[in-house]
Amino acid sequence: MNISELKSRFIKCKEYSTDNVNQLLDFAKKAYIHNEINIKEYSLLIRDLEANGAMTPDSENDNSLITHII
């Protein structure tokens, strides 16, 4: 699977189009978690999306609930 196939799945599922690579990254993660794509497809998608500027949220966010609870 490539990014254009991922976009097609996104459009079919969400009923709107996006070029936001972070939204596509989230969508790919959910597809992997729900066993809709395998680890190889997931890895390739993540690599390509990150190469296009996708980023995950900072894990050390000052507003994180986890750090405030502990």
Image (cartoon, rainbow, N blue to C red):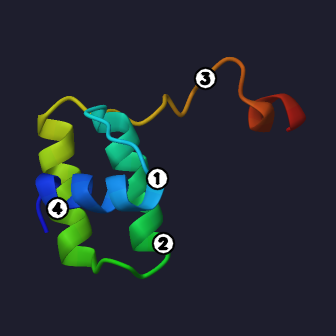
Q: Which residue is disc 1 drawn over?
A: 14
Residue located at (49% from left, 28% from top): 58
Task: Residue type at mark 2: give it.
Answer: Ile
Residue 3 coordinates in the image, percent (x, y) = 15, 53
Q: Which is more foreground, mark 1 or mark 3?
A: 1
**Mark 4 near mark 3, Cβ–Cβ under 8 Å?**
no
**Distance from label 2 to label 4 (Cα)?**
18 Å
Q: Earlier in the sequence, mark 1 or mark 3?
A: 1
User: Is the N terminus in the top left, top right, bottom left or bottom right quadrant?
Assistant: bottom left
Task: Please identify the quarter of the rendering in which residue 6 is found.
Answer: bottom left
From the image, which quarter does the C terminus lie in? top right
Viewer-nearest of discs 2 and 4: 4
Q: Mark 2 = which residue?
A: 33
Mark 3 vs mark 2, CA separation in Å: 24 Å
Badge 3 density bin: few <14, some 14–19, many ≥20, Cα 10 Å? few
According to the picture, the residue beneath numbered tag 4 turns out to be 5
Please state the horizontal and vertical placement of residue 40, each as a whole percent of the image.
18, 75
- Indicate whether 64 appears above or below 45: above
Inter-mark Cα distance, 1 to 3: 28 Å
Nearest to N terminus: mark 2 or mark 4: 4
Q: Nearer the viewer, residue 40 or 62?
A: 40
Residue found at x 43% / y 51%: 15
Q: Is residue 30 above or below residue 56?
A: below
Badge number at residue 61: 3
56 to 43, vertically: above or below: above
Three-letter code for the amino acid on which mark 4 is drawn: Glu
Instruction: Give the amino acid type for the residue marked by disc 3 in the picture.
Output: Asn
